[in-house]
Image (cartoon, rainbow, N blue to C red):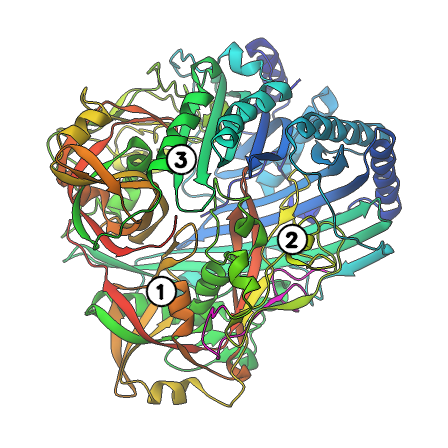
Amino acid sequence: MLPGFAANVRTVSPEALMEPGLDVAVKKRLADAALNAAKSKGATYADVRIGRYLNQFVITREDKVQNIVNTESYGVGIRVIANGCWGFAAVADAKSDAQIAKAAEDAVAIAKANSKLMKQPVELAPQKGFGEVSWKAPIKKNAFEVPVKEKVDLLLDVNAAAMKNGANYVNSILFMVNEQKYFASTDGSYIDQDIHRIWPNFTVTAIDPASGKFQTRNSLSSPMGMGYDYLQVNPKDKVTGVTTRYNMGYDMLEDITAGAQQAKMKLSAKSVEAGKYDLILDPSHLWLTIHESVGHPLELDRVLGYEANFAGTSFATLDKWQSKNFKYGSDKVTLIADKTQVGSLGAVGWDDEGVNTKKWDLVKDGVLVNYQAIRDQAKIIGEKESHGCCYADSWSSVQFQRMANVSLASGKTPLSVEDMIKDVKKGIYIIGDGSFSIDQQRYNFQFGGQLFYEIKDGKIVGMLKDVAYQSNTQEFWNSCVQVCDERDYRLGGSFFDGKGQPSQSSAVSHGSSTARFAGVNVINTARKI
Amino acid sequence: MAVLSKEEAKQIIDKVLAFSKADETSANLNGSRTGNIRYARNSVSTSGETTNLSLSVTSVFGKKSGTATINEFDDKSLEKTVRRAEEIAHLAPDNPEYVGMLGPQNYLDIKSFAASTDAINPDFRAEAAFKSIDPCAKKDLTAAGYWEDSTGFAALGNTKGLFGYNAATSVDFSITVRTNDGLGSGYAVRDVNDVSKLDVALATEVAIQKAQASSKAKALEPGKYTVILEPTAAVDLLQNMMGSMDARNADEGRSFLGKKGGGTRLGEKLFDERVNIYSDPQNLEIPGSPFGGGGGRFAFGGGGSDGRAQEKVVWVENGVVKNMYYSRYWAEKKGVKAIPPPSGFIFAGGNESLADLIKGTEKGILVTRLWYIRAVDPQTLLYTGLTRDGTFYIENGVIKYPVKNFRFNESPVIMLNNLEAAGKPMRQGGNLVPPLKIRDFTFTSLSDAV
């Protein structure tokens, strides 16, 4: 479950996570050393990222603390354009002007070496400098200020509730992140940012020894761009119904109590009959379908072929966008990219190449209208400026185009989930994300889930298992017949969106209200071995 | 200086251990230099080099342990790190599953380091990229590829007298070639310890041929087909299965190796009797690591960093599950040998080439590669994913035409019961895997992706 640690990540004491990083004046001095060194070696553009990345994991199972890990990673990454070509070099723990100047010179040398194979020089969309500015995530409680003991006690209480409610096993994790990033470029920006993320999650397992079968239920929490305030229980953040779901505050104890009971219920649930169903997809599920079938295919680097050897290309080719009438989805479908949404994982003030963040339409009333592009791509789609969605997962990684928060706009007319279900003759209501797979051009996908409820003649009649749905992106979004109104809007997301070689992780949120898709193909996944 | 000699590494570790005031202390020292070059649209997109040398110290008091890491190596810094690990240990809760550190181990001598790979520089990488891009550009095709080489070492020692050192090198290379009309795509992937064994031009040629041959694919109905999985396709499903052979999960009843009524399926015949899977860290084609965390491509590989010696292990013999792997805690609780997970596995095959397998197939599908594989049901090891970069219809022993990609839903357990033939193994991601001919492989839908 744990991500791989990048190079140069050190484990530290919990107290070290509260120590201040370098003073902003020192960072400015180091940044200028890099920029000046790069320019003196012939760079026509340079940017420098001074990053301090802090993580804390608290990992438990049943009544045991398995591990508490605190990590810190500090270093400097320098990206330049020389001879029209990109070059990048990074240096760990750099605190002297000389170390940083040397890395800047290395970056220029690499750019010059690579320029021999260059076909076309890099062309950056213009970007004004912002001078000395800062941005801080609007968190209410820094998770690193909360004592480790309090976090351990929470997880052990949560685990005890699971065991009391029928779980045979339980694993729970608290995962907290703080990125302290300083960016400077030859455009005249010096940007200091402080970003926080948190993800409480669990898996409960219920076993039927007689049949040898087991079922699991994962938490319905979402990773969020928030502090420890996400764990403050507040009734207004709860969405009640067939099971309780959560908005900007997560009640872990309540969710695991339900989760343990539901894992047991899944053991005796009815195995689904394969066929066509209307799907009612909760935001805790739909975020992942949006991520895979909208977020990724509309990344311009994939469309252009830069990810062909790994993540793949895209069905949403430039000619479809140029036609101005490519029906990505039904007229109920508007999909929005947003790097500013409060509480989301992707929210920052400026991206990792110094562009101020923004919000823009990708699909408007069903029609493909835009992509996600950064400075060296903007010109290709006729944009005068970058969308501000460039990101690197570490000071040691080179920044590139990453997915913004991509969300489905809520329905414009009032509609509750209950009213939506009333209208369904044969359907399945899916809550929580499960298994997911999609092809390299993002046509064909298959998704599972955590909880499946059968709907017959407008009523939920019981729980199902062995459910997965398969569809084609365009067909699926064109089958969207209803979206609930904004009262039901919630965020889901991932800490670990993978892309690039070497692979980098990015955290991204996807919001939606519950939506209905008509006549989707459902398969039964039960097998005998 | 990221790659230290055995003597240099031992000197640092001995110093660290001498500072110890804890019940037990261990030190792990790792260093590497990794370089890469990435290209797409027939042009280099990114390239870089990173070096890393870091020391991790774990101190234990009773069942409390703490770890601190550093990358400065003067005496003062080393002592400070030991003290910090001890402070963290004092603050940690008891770990009831803690097992005391190992004493001296007999580590196998493994030839995982190649001077040729250690000598790679940015010009060498740029040349490799050129050798791969140039033939594609000349044929009006588009190349996207990635090359990563690494040279590194791992050393570990503890206050119970254990010491181990291993140096390793690795190169990973992959290439996707696409036709400019977007209708054909081919792929090849190679990994070696010794770069002199890697022929970039030859691998590129394979990808070129697949791209050209896969253009204008026909649609076949999804369903059950006899397939020939090339090693690149077979390895992913097999690797997922090998990654699920943890004994504790099986004992706890939450694994495909759990059994109705309790217990595990160890000793049961679960696969066709021609299925034989073992691991051998001394195999010359896939030299592994003498212990977990042995440097190079296996730096974070099997066995963890607890210092357990890797040795030859038979996992499946004549279709019977012979071994599972254990944490030291679980092995002690169960009173069995604590076999670590392997750093790579060998699926024993025959002498038949891929061409021979095709020749012997009346009707079937040749699969180059599988993609986006995700678990659907851990109980049955059901996985879903798609074919990619060259899928072909075979009739009467010859490739007839390219076919559109399929989504599959299949379990490696079911697949290895439906084994028709296994050809000559080749290295794939640090494992040795043959092309596999499988009957009744389940394709559940079609994909338009190329």
Dividing the picture into quadrants, the one containing residue B221 is bottom left
Whether residue A105 appears in magenta in the rendering, the answer is no
Residue A139's tag is none
Mark 3–mark 1 Cα distance, whole angstroms, equals 32 Å
Tell me the residue that label 3 is attached to. B187
Q: Quadrant of the N terminus of chain B?
A: top right
**Of residues B394 and B400, the one drawn nearer to the viewer in this rendering:** B400
**Of residues A474 and B335, the one drawn nearer to the viewer in this rendering:** A474
Tell me the residue that label 1 is attached to. A449
Q: Position of residue A469 (x, y in %)?
A: 31, 65
The three-letter code of the residue at mark 1 reads Gly
**Neighbourhood count class around disc 1 (C-alpha, 10 Å): few under 14, some 14–19, many 20 upward:** many
Q: Circle 2 — which element?
A: helix
Q: Position of residue A269 (x, y in %)?
A: 22, 70
Whether residue A332 appears in magenta in the rendering, the answer is yes
Region of the chain picked out in magenta, as a range: A326-348
Tell me the subunit letter for badge 2: A
Secondary structure that dominates the magenta span: loop
The residue lying at 25 percent from left, 57 percent from top is A214
Tell me the subunit letter for badge 1: A
**Of residues A76 and B420, the one drawn nearer to the viewer in this rendering:** B420
**Neighbourhood count class around disc 3 (C-alpha, 10 Å): few under 14, some 14–19, many 20 upward:** many
Q: Position of residue A61 (x, y in %)?
A: 41, 52
The three-letter code of the residue at mark 3 reads Tyr
Q: Circle 3 — which element?
A: strand
Tell me the residue that label 2 is attached to. A380
The residue lying at 61 percent from left, 40 percent from top is B88
Whether residue B122 sits left or right of residue A95 in the image: it is left
Mark 1–mark 2 Cα distance, whole angstroms, equals 38 Å
Residue A20 appears in view? no
The three-letter code of the residue at mark 2 reads Ile
Mark 2–mark 3 Cα distance, whole angstroms, equals 27 Å
